[in-house]
Image (spheres, grey):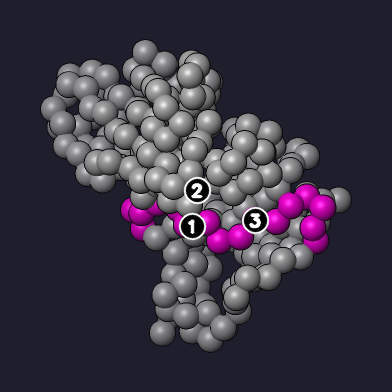
Amino acid sequence: GAVVSQHPSWVICKSGTSVKIECRSLDFQATTMFWYRQFPKQSLMLMATSNEGSKATYEQGVEKDKFLINHASLTLSTLTVTSAHPEDSSFYICSARWGSGSGNTIYFGEGSWLTVV
Amino acid sequence: SQQGEEDPQALSIQEGENATMNCSYKTSINNLQWYRQNSGRGLVHLILIRSNEREKHSGRLRVTLDTSKKSSSLLITASRAADTASYFCATDPPGMLTFGGGTRLMVKP
């Protein structure tokens, strides 16, 4: 079945540095990928929709200059947390829609734990 | 904003019992999808039900969709300890999948 891979699974970085998380669709092309953030025992919060070849669409309240999203190819989207602070520590999950139709299954990566110290 | 809202938020049952979780949403949808998440892990897709479907089965899973009430239910039959996880419903209007708060299911051996 369709697989979405995220890397890294765990990352620890110092305050003020930037960290990049990759999301890859391994056996299908994804024109649209989604980035979510999840706090412990809470649901997923959609951060942005990543569109291949164009700018990402950010949800209200999400700083686009803080969370840089690049969707350079049909199989790769990256999320860069810039000038990270401890409050950015969270679980970040990406997803990709299989196929171009809105009625298709959306598959999720395994998530990336970010800890900013 | 969250479109799907799950009920109950937490459910504890004995192995072998059935578990039923409900989900409600607010606007028209193309489909509704159920996911499972083990603690600190990614989401595993369980089942997709389209807006023109009323019921769908997959193994021990049974999903219903009532578009007039804007609600869905997930039934897990003959539960196992390995079913312990959080379960989310998510709606798919064009372009976006929005999640409910999830139901934390604990199945005691």
Q: Do the residues labelled 3 and 1 touch (CB within 8 Å)?
A: no
Quarter of the image holding residue A24?
Answer: top left
Q: Which residue is drawn at 48% across and 52% down?
A: A2
The residue that appears at 29% across and 33% down in the rendered structure is A21
Name the element at disc 3.
strand
Quadrant containing the C terminus of chain B is bottom left
Q: In this view, does B45 lie to the left or right of A86?
A: right
Which quadrant holds residue A103? Answer: top right
Q: Is residue B106 magenta-colored?
A: no
User: What chain is tagged by disc 3?
Assistant: B
What is the span of residues highlighted in magenta in the rendered image? Answer: B39-54
Instruction: Confirm whether residue B52 shows in the render.
Output: yes
Residue B28 x %, y %: 78, 39
Dot 1 amino acid type: Gly
Q: Nearer the viewer, residue B22 or A11?
A: A11
Seen from the viewer's position, the closer of residues A104 and B87 is: A104
Chain designation of label 2: A
Q: Residue B96 sits in which quadrant?
A: top right
Name the residue tied to disc 2: A107
Callout 1: chain: A
Q: Badge 1, how many Cα within 10 Å: few under 14, some, many 20+?
A: few
Q: Where does the image place residue B50, in percent across and percent down from the top left?
A: 74, 52
Residue B16 in percent (x, y) is at 53, 86
User: Residue B6 bears which disc, if any?
Assistant: none
Identify the mark at residue B48; answer none if there is no mark: 3
At label 2, the amino acid type is Tyr
Residues under numbered marks 2 and 3 in contact, where contact means CB atoms less than 8 Å apart: no
Residues at discs 2 and 1 both on one chain = yes
Q: How crowded is mark 2: few (under 14 residues within 10 Å), some or many (20 or more)?
A: many
Residue at image mark 1: A1
